[in-house]
Amino acid sequence: MEVEVKFRLPNKSAHQKLLSVLSPFHITTLHQHNQFIDGSAYELSSQRAVLLLRLYEQTRIPQCVVCLKAKPVLVDGVSRIEMEYEELDPAIFKACLDDPQKLMHVDLRVLRRVKEEFGVKRFVGLGGFRNVRNVYMWKGMKLEVDEAKYDFGEMYEVECETSEPERVKKMMEDFVKENGIDYSYSVMSKFAVFRAGKLPPS
């Protein structure tokens, strides 16, 4: 179970302001290519799950993961989701952009679970988005500031994985308020936004 505090930033101005304020705590910038996969009969999404292929671009050695996300709950800026992931050969990621069915022949625990537990017989690609993630170590917590780039627009978020969501949420709220940064609680996951085909209202 992954638990995260997730705040939505209303626009690029708020995003840039947060990046500036956090700049002394910057660790790295990740460029992600995210691709969503389902069964041909929507076996995953009909059971509130999705398969995510994520390629980390612009790294010295390309890295890729395949991740099963299931049963998401997002309330008052706190996200809880069941998640299981494994490393995936980047060459397979690229091959699956053209033919997701090639995943059927990949022997990974996550994919076996998808086939056996969810009954997927054939994989189909749903599309995806790119994301620029700036990572910071702030007060002992890892903050991730995202710029998600969809075909229909860009969305900005800051999130923090934690086992103490209420305490961390209060710390994050105090921080953005002290620095005059507009925010709201995130109300939709990035996958939900992608499926909706439009950005949620600010």
Image (spheres, rainbow, N blue to C red):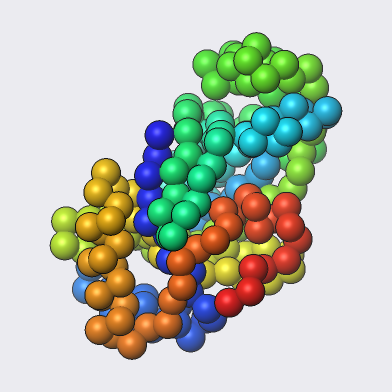
Toward the left, the furthest residue is 139
Counting the numbered discs, the total is: 0
Q: Quadrant of the N terminus?
A: top left
Residue at the image point whose x is 47% and y is 54% from the top: 75
Q: Where is residue 197, by image quadrant?
A: bottom right
Q: How far from the left and from the top, in percent, is residue 187?
A: 54, 61
Residue at 46%, 66% in the rendered image: 185
Q: Would residue 62 appear left or right of 150 to someone viewing this image?
A: left
Residue 186 spot, x, y in % from top left = 50, 63
Compared to 166, does 22 lie above or below?
below
Closer to us: 88 or 35: 35
Residue 28 appears in the picture as rendered: no
In the image, taking residue 65 as reference, residue 121 lies left or right, namely: right
Q: How far across and how far down the image is residue 168, in percent? A: 25, 58
Query: Relative to 153, does residue 95 appear above or below in the rendering?
Result: above
* Residue found farthest to the front: 75
At x 83%, y 28%, the residue is 41
Quadrant for the C terminus in the image: bottom right
Q: Nearer the viewer, residue 188 or 93?
A: 188
Quadrant in which residue 18 is drawn: bottom left
Residue 142's image quarter? bottom left
Q: Residue at x 74, y 48 (%)?
A: 127
Viewer can see residue 173: yes
Where is residue 76 drawn, in percent x and y?
Answer: 44, 60
